[in-house]
Amino acid sequence: MYNDWEPVIGLEIHAQLNTESKIFSNDSTSFGNGDNQNVSPVSLGMPGALPVVNKKVIENSIRTGLALNCQIRNKSVFSRKNYFYPDLPKGYQISQFDEPICEHGFVEFNLDGKTKRIGITRAHMEEDAGKSTHHGDYTLINLNRAGVPLLEIVSEPEIKTPAEAAEYARTVRQILRFLEVCDGNLEEGSLRCDCNVSVMKKGAKEFGTKVEIKNINSFRFVEKAIEYEISRQIEVIESGGEIFQETRLFDSTKNKTYAMRKKEQAHDYRYFPDPDLLPVVFKQEWVEEIKKSLPELPRDMAARFQSEYNIPEYDALVLTQEKELASFFEDVAKLSKNPKSASNWVMVELQRELNEQKLDISQSPVSSKRLAKLIELIDTKVISGKIAKTVFALLLKEDKDPDVIVKEQGLVQITDSGAIEKMVDDVIAASPNQVEQYRGGKDKLFGYFVGQIMKASKGQANPEMINKLLKEKLKG
Ligand code: ADP
Ligand code: MG
């Protein structure tokens, strides 16, 4: 794909853990509060203020680590990462360095019909920094975010294509959302994705110099930014230039990355264990307890959907993108007793409507109960599949059960053979030319007759009965 070049990609994903209070203080993490309201001496970095670790952050980190197939360290250490920035009043960020809480995991996902496994090097706890907003010649600093818990999930440099990187990131987000430890909102920054990219000659033993692209706020841009960066690096090297280890930003309007700053090395940060915090130590029983409380994870759920509901893998993967969507589907499947039809209606008709109205499944204008009832009306031949679309459109607008709509609108399927026979006769009598052509061998005209009869019945005649009667009569 890139001639004799091979890209190497590794992702660092920062997930804000959605605890009610911050990682080292009882300051609120609520978004709704005014600027600099969620602060205390700890968040403000006052000298002498002491951090106390939030147990919920550790618990949620263990939950996530387990879901990412990591080994959980029963003793981990908080370290200071020293650097200066106006929104970091302490002059250091509390993070984890050589003894992170989670290590050696992996995630799996499907891409182009194949299962891909990407290694997770580590996942460590750290605090978020504050936020600077720049206004012309002055800058405002809001420390509400300072101390919000983050879990940084670091992948192995095993990702090989931009599409793989985006799918890996989507999968991590999906798992975080299933666990309900992070809302995964990229636009609001509760999930942030840094992409490390380098290129090397195919078959080379050593990686090339990597560049880090920061602050990309959608998975589509992850793909685009990496794509651009790969081409840029190949071009630079092929024209005799050199790649520098640096941090770059992605401009989504120009579809390009540009240099932001030279990348610091680990030794520039002078990491050392934070003397204000004890190591985090817990018993294995706690880990086992948390393991037992894990929800069903997306891939397991998708596998169960395939075997339990006998739906195709594709459907199962789409339906398990979001936990709420999956549970909506399960409700419809169980109530209608027709899982394949439930899957189609949820994935196609309902999903289209939700996308159009920019709603998520929890705001669905049609309840799972009503959608199941609609499927039942088709399966019991009260209405045809075609009329069902009409009923569905009405369900979106009216707060009524489908059977009520069918009755009120007189949409019940016509299965009276006498009535259908009359319509068939009428159409045949009105189309002598077509009848002659059909009998002369123009089979395609069969569809024309079906269409005419459907039209005459306003879509309500039972299609199988039309087919049967029409065939008999056209034989002549
Ligand atoms: P740093 O010390 O610069 O933070 P790390 O070794 O901790 O670098 O790796 C950070 C991220 O960069 C990881 O996701 C890792 O997989 C990825 N990475 C490391 N080396 C390379 C490389 N040569 N090319 C692309 N990605 C890399
Ligand atoms: Mg690193």
Image (tube, rainbow, N blue to C red):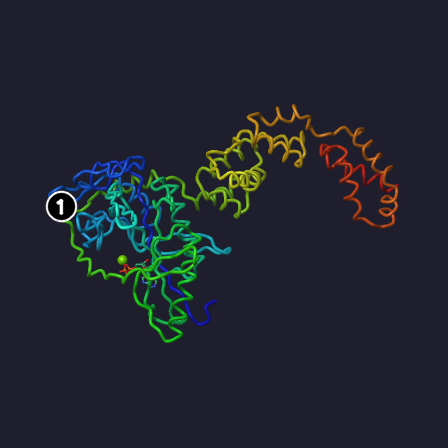
Instruction: Decide if residue 224 is on the left or right side of residue 129.
Output: right
Q: Which residue occupies the extreme left position in the image?
A: 48
One can see residue 388 in this view: yes
Left or right side of 318 for 11: left
Question: For mark 1, what is the residue?
Answer: 276
Q: Residue furthest front?
A: 137
- Name the residue located 39 percent from the left edge and 75 percent from the top edge: 239
The residue closer to the viewer here, 222 or 444, is 222
Q: Is residue 376 left or right of residue 53?
A: right
Quarter of the view holding residue 212? bottom left
In the depicted structure, whether residue 91 falls above or below residue 322: below
Which quadrant of the figure shows ligand 1? bottom left
x and y percent of residue 236 in the render?
A: 38, 71
Query: Which residue is depicted at the point 46% across and 71% down?
Result: 3
| Residue 309 location (% of width, % of height) | 53, 40
Q: Residue at x 20, y 55 (%)?
A: 83
Residue 189 x, y percent position in the rendering:
34, 46
Considering every residue shown, the one lying at the far bottom of the view is: 240
**Mark 1 crowdedness (10 Å alpha carbons): few <14, some 14-19, many ≥20:** few
Dot 1 amino acid type: Asp
Give SS at disc 1.
Answer: loop
